[in-house]
Image (tube, rainbow, N blue to C red):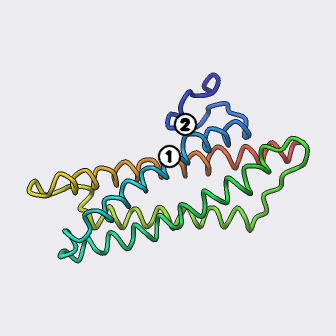
C-alpha cells in the first residue's frame, strides 16, 4: 500500500490509504469542479462558435452527444454531493448504499463513459485537421482532457471509494 493520502485527486491509485469521508471531500473539492469547468469550457465553445462549424454533420452530432453526456454528469455530481457523500461522511449514522443505488451509479457512469467514447470516435480519437480553427483545436483538446478526468473519476469511485465505504460500514 502507498503511504498516506495523495495530494491531488488526479494522482489517486489503487492501494492508496484514504478514508472514505476524506475521499468524498477530495472528489467534491477537486474532481467535481474540474469536471464542471471542462464541460463549461466546451459548452462555451459551442455557444460562441457553433454556428461556424455546423456545416459538418459530425460536429453537430458531437455537440448533441456532448450535451447528453454533460447532463448525465451534472445530475450524478448533484446526487453525489447532496445525497451519497453526506451519508458516507456522516459519523453519527450508518450509511448503507443499497444495491439499487449502487447499480444506478455504475449504470450512469457507464453511460457517461460510452458517450465520451462515442465523441472520441466521432472526433477521430481527438485528432484535428491542421486547417481547423485554433478554437476548434482547443475544444477538441478540452474533450481529450475531459475524457481523462471522467475515466479517473469513475475509476476512483468504482474501485476505491464505494468498495472501501461499503467495507468500512459493513465492519462497524
Residue linked to disc 2: 9
Query: Who comes first in sequence, dot 2 or dot 1?
Result: 2
Residue 105 lies in quadrant = bottom right
- Is 39 on the left or on the right of 55, as rendered? right
Image quadrant where one finds the N terminus? top right
Q: Is residue 170 left or right of residue 111?
A: right
Quadrant in which residue 121 is drawn: bottom left
- Relative to 57, residue 112 above or below: above
**Viewer-closest of 3 and 70:** 70
Q: Position of residue 155 (x, y in %)?
A: 55, 48
Whether pointer 2 and pointer 1 mark residues with C-beta atoms closer than 8 Å, the reply is yes
Q: Secondary structure at mark 1?
A: helix
Residue 79 at x, y percent in the picture: 67, 60
Please indicate whether residue 58 sits to the left or right of residue 142 in the image: left
Between the residue at mark 2 and the residue at mark 1, the CA separation in whole angstroms equals: 9 Å
Q: In this figure, which residue is indicated by the disc labeled 1? A: 152
Judged from this view, the residue extending furthest toward the top is 3
**What percent of the width, then of the height, locates residue 30?**
55, 40
Which element carries disc 2, helix, strand or loop? helix
Instruction: State the image quarter where residue 139 is shown.
Output: bottom left
Q: Is residue 106 above or below residue 12?
A: below
Give the residue displayed 24% in from the left and 73% down from the top: 58
Amino acid at each position: 500500500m502507498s503511504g498516506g493520502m495523495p495530494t491531488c485527486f488526479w494522482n489517486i491509485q489503487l492501494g492508496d490509504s484514504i478514508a472514505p469521508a476524506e475521499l468524498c471531500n477530495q472528489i467534491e473539492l477537486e474532481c467535481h469542479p474540474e469536471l464542471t469547468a471542462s464541460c463549461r469550457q466546451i459548452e462555451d465553445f459551442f455557444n460562441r462558435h457553433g454556428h461556424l462549424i455546423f456545416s459538418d454533420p459530425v460536429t453537430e452530432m458531437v455537440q448533441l452527444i456532448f450535451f447528453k453526456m454533460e447532463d448525465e454528469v451534472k445530475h450524478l455530481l448533484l446526487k453525489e454531493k447532496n445525497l451519497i457523500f453526506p451519508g458516507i461522511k456522516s459519523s453519527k449514522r450508518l450509511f448503507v448504499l443499497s444495491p439499487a443505488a449502487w447499480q444506478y451509479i455504475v449504470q450512469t457512469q457507464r453511460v457517461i463513459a460510452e458517450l465520451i467514447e462515442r465523441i472520441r470516435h466521432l472526433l477521430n480519437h481527438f485528432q484535428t485537421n491542421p486547417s481547423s480553427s485554433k478554437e476548434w483545436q482547443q475544444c477538441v483538446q478540452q474533450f481529450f482532457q475531459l475524457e481523462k478526468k471522467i475515466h479517473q473519476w469513475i475509476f476512483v469511485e468504482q474501485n476505491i471509494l464505494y468498495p472501501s465505504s461499503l467495507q468500512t460500514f459493513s465492519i462497524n
